[in-house]
Amino acid sequence: MTRPEPDTLRIMALLERPGFALDVDTAFPLEGVTALFGRSGCGKTTLLRIIAGLEHPPGGEVHFRDTAWQSGKTFIPLHRRRVGLVFQESTLLPHLSVRGNLLYGYKRTPEPLRRLHLDEVARLLGIDDLLERRADQLSGGQRQRVALGRALLTSPDLLLLDEPLNALDTQTKREIMPFLARLSEETGIPSLLVTHAPDEVERLATRVAFMHDGQLERLEPLRDALARADSPLFRDDGAVSVLQGELGPADAHGLHPFGPPEAQYRVPSTPGATNGAGRRARLRIDARDVSIALSPPQDVSILNIIPVTIESLDEAPGHHGPARVLAVCRQDDGQTLMAELTRLSTDRLKLQPGARAHALVKSVAFLD
Amino acid sequence: MTRPEPDTLRIMALLERPGFALDVDTAFPLEGVTALFGRSGCGKTTLLRIIAGLEHPPGGEVHFRDTAWQSGKTFIPLHRRRVGLVFQESTLLPHLSVRGNLLYGYKRTPEPLRRLHLDEVARLLGIDDLLERRADQLSGGQRQRVALGRALLTSPDLLLLDEPLNALDTQTKREIMPFLARLSEETGIPSLLVTHAPDEVERLATRVAFMHDGQLERLEPLRDALARADSPLFRDDGAVSVLQGELGPADAHGLHPFGPPEAQYRVPSTPGATNGAGRRARLRIDARDVSIALSPPQDVSILNIIPVTIESLDEAPGHHGPARVLAVCRQDDGQTLMAELTRLSTDRLKLQPGARAHALVKSVAFLD
Amino acid sequence: TIAAASDLRFALDEILEAYREAYPDDRVRVTYGSSGRMTTQILNGAPYDIFFSADIAYPKRLYAEGAAVTEPSVYAIGRIVLWSNRMDASELTLEDLTRDDIRRVAIASPTHAPYGVRAKEALKAAGVWEELQPKIVNGDNIAQTARMVQAGGADIGIIALSLAEFPDLAEHPHHLIDDALHEPLTQGFVITRRGADKDTAHRFAGFMGRDTAREIMQRYGFEMPGSE
Amino acid sequence: MLDLSPTDWMAIEVTLKLALYTTLILLVIATPIAWWLANGRGSPGVRTAVQALVALPLVLPPTVLGFYLLVLLGPAGPVGSTLESWGLNHLAFTFQGILIGSVIYSLPFAVQPLQQAFANLGRRPVEIAGSLGAGRIDRFVTVILPMTRGGFIVAATLAFAHTLGEFGVILMLGGAIPGETQVLSILIYDHAEAMDFDSAHRLSFGLLIFAFAVLFIVYAINRRFDTVRL
Amino acid sequence: MLDLSPTDWMAIEVTLKLALYTTLILLVIATPIAWWLANGRGSPGVRTAVQALVALPLVLPPTVLGFYLLVLLGPAGPVGSTLESWGLNHLAFTFQGILIGSVIYSLPFAVQPLQQAFANLGRRPVEIAGSLGAGRIDRFVTVILPMTRGGFIVAATLAFAHTLGEFGVILMLGGAIPGETQVLSILIYDHAEAMDFDSAHRLSFGLLIFAFAVLFIVYAINRRFDTVRL
Ligand SMILES: Nc1ncnc2c1ncn2[C@@H]1O[C@H](COP(=O)(O)OP(=O)(O)OP(=O)(O)O)[C@@H](O)[C@H]1O
Ligand SMILES: Nc1ncnc2c1ncn2[C@@H]1O[C@H](COP(=O)(O)OP(=O)(O)OP(=O)(O)O)[C@@H](O)[C@H]1O
Ligand SMILES: [Mg+2]
Ligand SMILES: [Mg+2]
């Protein structure tokens, strides 16, 4: 464990508090967005603080790539770790204006390392009108955006984001998330994102780390996390499938073909998204949006009817009880598609693992 | 406007700030939960502060039932308004323990007015293990729950909640929301809830107030807000129908009949919810979960196939573009059901207002 | 630099003027203060060349400790008086101080101020010390005592004759206290080790013995040694 | 052991009484002044002027301040003569007199730290308490006071220590009457001036030990109740 | 107009120099002490003891404190004799000497408000600045200093005003040498002793006006930069 490995963030830490113990020994790949998911009080903030060097558990180890941030007597203080940090609460420097806050870290970033600039960031976060305001003259969501922008403007080596969007309305979030997604893709800044919002995880995360009671229970790619029937991500909306494929040009009805002929979807284009033709894309399909029919039905408004083989039938996750069944189906192109059914339907249709059927996919959404 | 009316909260206020002006003249019915919905910086917090008496715009008027809270020279200070307030940020008294915080308002509530008690509230909010902690030893979500509990324990005449659940994970939220819903029903404490989460609105709200740029644009019952095709609530998940009806006892498959015979659903029971038989219930149906078929299909896992008449076909709201259509259908019991279709499907099925069809309802959810 | 007890203030100022006229090239400066403090300061290296004390005990001590180079010599003998700015003090005696209409009697601190010590002796000798106890208020030094009376805080005070002769205070009459009631206020001076090599210091010491200086001192109510 | 004379003991008693009363009175007076300076209504210019005014007693040499107070409080001064005309005693050379002097002289030490503490508090805690039904006084006692405890401690200890050491004003105004206005600092001064350094050292040492003990205890208690602020 | 003698002018100059230097030196010394007391490592017991110790210069009568300093800094004292043995002058009766005295005597006024301000700050602002790449000194200058400005103002004004009025220590340690150690407060005292009340009043009045002006300006500037804290 103590031997550093390249391109991971390795953490080993034990921290005891009355009624709470954090015990983590893990390595996060330093690529893309790692979502940190877990219940209130499970230790997410504490973990970020250890990584940042704000908590200093004796005997702990933190290695960023091949640099020891904390190991034995070595302890690199926060300001030399080049970490962009967005705190969960009360985050602005009250004696500075919005501009002063945004530029505080920027000015301390060596010129060649600066990858983002004030105007761009302020515009994208929708705070360009507020630059001369004092920090105490902002609304909650505005404060949060300034804190996010300030962290981004340091062009850090690692972003630690503690619920950075939770005071934002859906629309503002929608405007910011593509920017964050692009940022992670284009600049390659890895980030650790604490969030309670499944939409943020789906939209931004490359992988998901599940925390529970001070322990890191699992770290897995987003695809797997979504596919597992008992994933805690499903507690909200039920199981989700994510399909990858190529997107073709729109037809006369404004629908794009997606995926290979043996499992082809027709997908309406979304005006906001830049889903040009010939591009690889990700589709998100809620299991509850998928029905199963033995024969392809006629006269139905459902566009996408995909032949599948049923692989397994489990009790559906979440709060839905024994009356619901999660059917894991394999498309003919090999990708997994999940369908949530009632037990009555499975019984009536006599569904069995191995059976051939048609999946009726009511609606799909692009992930990026 | 200045004449007070019973059982409303009437506000008339004009407040100017650099780059922002709040101009509100409205009356909220004092019953149930009014959700205040609007983009970051639109003035939601400011409005709550005016109602609480923390902002004091000259010439403003605030009347609670037939009591003038602010009118001309009359100004009743906050501590005599009996308002339960949850601030958006930094909300605990740092020199008190969790228990001290929770009891601070409780002790100042006259005994006969106390409707909630420490043990109950702490248990329901999941903070009963934290009572002896100091306020600075809590996680973000724990702090938020303490602040909420503290406001509830004053058994106020009006609750003003500024994003009270936004630091909470989905599961904790799910545990707290039924409690809040029940509270509003049983104790009749009216509340004003600022939130950005559509699930909170759907779950808790009786009506929705939409704010935009310092103005109150619309105040309408939840049903109407959801039904309107261009409602800002839809920006996230698309249109939603809410059906009311009676719930029957579970059958052998664990499914409950819901609604009258001419538009009867079969609904799986949710273990958590107490949906006993013979009870009135609300069903939430996402428009994108509804498909249309001209004839009732066979061999399909979809359970609920409801005969409807198509009333109108509009462009679907949200980011979905011209390729999507929102079909507003009338069930035979008179309630409205919405379906989101692709334009291709409507064309293919030759759907027209007035046409008879069958709605295939893939999944439903209880609202309480 | 001359260090001098505060009771010398007015007299010495005038003597200095005369001295400067006589020796315009000499630079002399005077600092007034309490004798005890100045003694301490001289023992700790204060830049004073001559020290005129209100009580010869202090110069004696300096000489004994080697901080002074000349034997202490007496330059004057002080007198104490009863003085008030509210009543005619010249009509009063020490015994009258016990009268009910006199509520506060100010004296200099009998612990450290020489004039205070003498005042106490005089009151004791007059047999009123014990009875007067509740009325006594103490000033830090004789000048402050005078100010206490002048400000009206105390009805009457025992102050130095040299102060009572000062124009502002001389408006009100005083009662000279019989010098038999107390030990004499022999005032002595020394030249300090620091001043040992300075001509000016010696010249000024000599000047103090001349008639001009003695005459001024007498005018301010000091008795001169050997003039009886 | 320090063996102390009855005069010493009397001085100790007067000193303690004076320091204690001064501190208490100062806290009572300074709190509303400091609150008003920090949060009050009224033009900022006026508040700034008052704030500067409050610091002025520090600027004058104590004996000079004492002299002015003596004139003011003595039988001939406006306050003293008013009191006399009511059949009361004027205040010069009384315990009350030096108490007034100490209070005035130490006022800035009490007002300034409190003002700063109040200003630092911000309005949120008060708003929270208000929303929970606490009225003005209730809020003050249960929220403002505990949250600005640090400021009160600074104010109280500076005022207390300064009163222990103060002697210029007291000497002038009090006249060092044993058992009434002769405080320890004057006694020590007296001994030092009389070159009775033994007594001076002994009393100084005692005073230092005592003051140290009091301050240590106060600070230690304060530290125990420290809350970390996020 | 106040017409002032050359002695007066000299005293004014010395006073200003002394008050200014004292304030500056105090801020420099007191800042690290206060920081350590508020946030430092080391056992709380030790910190509490040091905190109490810092307040002690207040407790002794100024002239007595002056006496001890005189003994310490004079030719016979440990500091003075060391200096002399290096061929330097001892510090008693010099400007440097009274500067040291003033600094020691006013130390508590600088340390305590600063300590309180630092303690109130909490760790969040420092953490934020650290996360943005600011090192220790950078953080101190750009975050802690501006955010605890109130504490520095209180510390500076108390120290400044107190030095203007201080005279016991200076009298004992300085010996009132015009142009070197004779400060205004001593001069005023002297005038008062000489019953030259005209001069005393005149100088007192001037001193008050001056102090008021300085304080008013400082406070007014401070108020302008006030930020409201949530
Ligand atoms: N300063 C502290 N002292 C003691 N215990 C603390 C302290 N801060 C947090 N805790 C406890 O440590 C645990 C983990 O806290 P942490 O802030 O890491 O949770 P979190 O996962 O970020 O929760 P949330 O989603 O509510 O912000 C919690 O049980 C909390 O009560
Ligand atoms: N103290 C203040 N001084 C000046 N302007 C302010 C102040 N507080 C808020 N504002 C501005 O007033 C507007 C409304 O703020 P408010 O806090 O009411 O927004 P909000 O709707 O609560 O937003 P959010 O969802 O981000 O919390 C914002 O544009 C904000 O910048
Ligand atoms: Mg957290
Ligand atoms: Mg807000």
Image: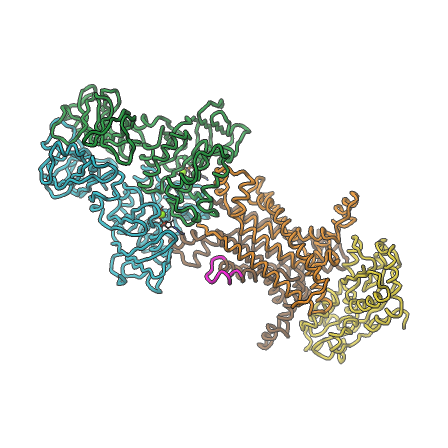
Chain colours: A green, B cyan, C yellow, D brown, E orange
The image quarter containing residue B237 is top left
Q: Image height check: is B297 above or below B137?
A: above
Magenta segment main secondary structure: helix
Q: In which quarter of the image is the C terminus of chain A?
A: top left
Q: What residue span does the magenta drawing correspond to?
A: D38-48
Horizontal side of C190 relative to A229 (left or right) equals right
Q: Image height check: is C199 above or below A125?
A: below
State the residue at coordinates (31%, 29%).
Answer: A231
The image quarter containing residue A198 is top left
Is D40 within the magenta?
yes
State the residue at coordinates (79%, 53%).
Answer: C45
Question: In the image, residue E101 lies at what x, y percent?
Answer: 69, 52
Q: From where the camera sits, is residue E8 visible?
A: yes
Query: Which is more toward the observer, E213 or D137?
Result: E213
Is E100 within the magenta?
no
Horizontal side of B286 relative to E186 (left or right) equals left
Question: In the image, residue E113 lies at what x, y percent?
Answer: 56, 51
Question: In the image, residue A51 lies at what x, y percent?
Answer: 46, 32
Q: Image height check: is E215 above or below E90?
A: below
